[in-house]
Image (cartoon, rainbow, N blue to C red):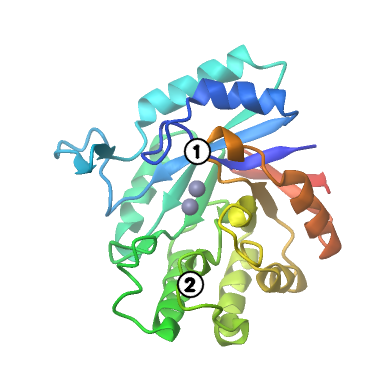
Amino acid sequence: MLADYHVHTQFSDDSVYPMAQVVKDAVARGIQEICFTDHVDYGIKDDWDSGRPIVCRGDELLANVDYPLYFAQIRELQCLYETQITLKAGLEFGMQAHTVLQYETLFQKYPLDFVILSIHQIDDLEFWTQDFQRTRSQKEYHQRYYEEMLHLVNTYHNYSVLGHMDLIVRYDEKGVYPYEKIRPLVREILQVVIRDGKGIELNTSYHRYGLKDTTPSVHILQEYRELGGEMITIGSDSHTPAHLGAGLQEAKELLKSLGFRFFCTYDKMQPVFHPL
Ligand SMILES: [Zn+2]
Ligand SMILES: [Zn+2]
């Protein structure tokens, strides 16, 4: 069974891939289930109905998912494609310590199957622009990134999996930071995740970013397995047709080789286990 559990559409500010076309392409590629996980990044972006002017980056409008339209469109596509593919409603929460309350409110408001807890920025400073890293040493930005994650998993509980757990590596211009140095923090985070019945994701985007390791690294995947972690989703993090469903089968093989027996899909925030 192939399920892509990290999929962006035109409802994310960084994608123009029409949701209906995503579904058509997924069916054509033999994928049995997808979960839409469009971006919400409070602190950086406002909701459409916030009443404040929408921020622009060049000629792009920066805003979170238009929730009423999003959920309506997912429902419509679920009906239309009922016999061909299972479609789930998720969101990717780009959380920060100071935005937790906004996510609590959002989570209560809409019927979600699945939530990815990701960290894309800290103190409103983005990683992809280097704004967060610029004023810190490599040790400081790695340390701070995982400290923020530990704080979030200790504070916020309405999520399903931690997204691309070592994302900071993708935007680290200083080369490989030794795993041993962040291992104690990673272990602490994973222990909380497991204790709380949450999971992590294997994000197959490492190919297109040219990373030497997987996302998260094989070290982290092994650590999670050794600590008893079993809940893991597989997602392409696609924003364009070329990436939808990429690397799903390969990811399953990798997980199997690391001793995992299952991967997960989600229904109304409850995990469903599938043999690898
Ligand atoms: Zn992300
Ligand atoms: Zn994403």
The answer to whether residue 158 shows anywhere in this view is: no
Label 1 Cα neighbours within 10 Å, binned few <14 / some 14-19 / many ≥20: many
Q: CA distance from mark 1 to mark 2?
A: 26 Å
Q: Nearer the viewer, residue 190 or 105?
A: 190
Residue kind at label 1, given as amino acid type: His
Q: Quadrant of residue 202?
A: bottom right
Q: Is mark 1 within 8 Å of ligand 2?
A: yes
Could you say whether the residue bearing mark 2 is in a helix, strand or loop?
A: helix
In the picture provided, is 25 more to the left or to the right than 142? Answer: right
Residue 34 lies, with reference to residue 260, above or below; the image says above
Pick the residue in front: 21 or 164.
Answer: 21
Q: Quadrant of residue 23?
A: top right
| Residue nearer the viewer, 173 or 20 | 173
Callout 1–callout 2 Cβ contact below 8 Å: no
Q: Nearer the viewer, residue 186 or 108?
A: 186
Q: Is 230 left or right of 103, judged from the image as shown?
A: right
- Give how far across and how far down residue 147 sits, in percent: 44, 76
For residue 157, above or below residue 238 = below
Residue 212 rendering spot, x and y as whole percentages: 65, 67
Q: Is mark 2 within 8 Å of ligand 1?
A: no
Q: Which residue is mark 2?
A: 150
Q: Residue at x 34, y 61 (%)?
A: 129
The tag on residue 8 is 1
x and y, in percent, of residue 75 in the image: 52, 20
